[in-house]
Image (tube, rainbow, N blue to C red):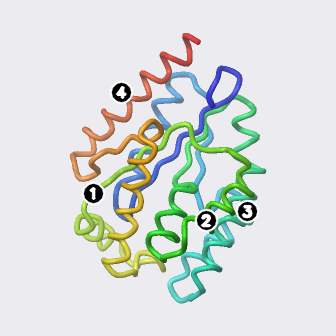
Amino acid sequence: MADEQRGYFLTFEGGEGMGKSTQIAVVDKFLRVAGEQVVFTREPGGTPLGERIRELLLDREGGMQRESELLLMFAARAEHLAQVVVPALAAGKWVICDRFTDASYAYQGGGRGLSDMRIKILEDWVQDGLKPDLTILLDGSISVGMERVGRRGERDRFEQEARGFFQRVRDSYLQRARREPNRFVVLDATAPKEKVSAAIVAKLEALLAVRRSA
């Protein structure tokens, strides 16, 4: 999907405590130093409405039906795509997104037990064929992730879930990575963060070389 006129859509995925924020900061700096225009964003969120939806979704005191959770995710995504992602890609920019639709399949599908078919219907409707060019999946044991989350302080609505929920999320992510090996890069998030960063930067250096030679 990527070409020299269109930007590049890079997403980061992974369970709780896998270090996405740390690695996204590394990528953001690397691309800017390389002279690329970069838009950093996140899901749910990325727009004023999306951020308000995010507050509802993460509210540790708020309960909701799993179907409501999925629909709110895609409502935020529709705004996000229209206002941020699609315009940035059309302008030739790199879009770095902290989670995207793979998270819906992992959390609302794997974690909550909603069928992939229902999620796919919303994906087709809202995204109209748009998918990330590259997805970096930071994978690691549930125990390590929960230990890291525990050091942050108060947990949000998702972070309060039981271990079984997070195991299903992880299994779903890995299953998606196996299905689309050309899009996913799976990295061990429990390795030293410098090693993880080096692997990501090496991948980006190769991508930039290809794009600039096209």
Q: Which amino acid type is marked by label 4?
A: Ala
Sequence-wise, the earlier of marks 1 and 2 is: 2
Q: Are the residues at dot 1 and dot 4 in contact (C-beta closer than 8 Å)?
A: no
Give the vertical position of 92 relative to 146 (above or below).
Answer: above
Q: Nearer the viewer, mark 2 or mark 3?
A: 2
Give SS at disc 4: helix
The residue to which callout 4 is attached is 202
Work out how far the residue at label 3 is from the one at label 1, CA to CA, in angstroms: 32 Å
Q: Nearer the viewer, residue 173 or 188?
A: 173
Sequence-wise, the earlier of marks 1 and 4 is: 1
The residue to which callout 2 is attached is 119
Residue 10 placement (x, y as % from top left)? 54, 40
Work out how far the residue at label 1 is from the one at label 4, CA to CA, in angstroms: 21 Å
The residue to which callout 1 is attached is 140
- What is the number of the mark on residue 48? 3
User: How many neighbours does mark 1 have within 10 angstroms: few (below 14), some (14-19), or many (20 or more)?
Assistant: many
Q: Nearer the viewer, residue 33 or 181?
A: 181
User: How many neighbours does mark 2 have within 10 angstroms: few (below 14), some (14-19), or many (20 or more)?
Assistant: some
Work out how far the residue at label 2 is from the one at label 3, CA to CA, in angstroms: 24 Å
Q: Which amino acid type is marked by label 1?
A: Gly
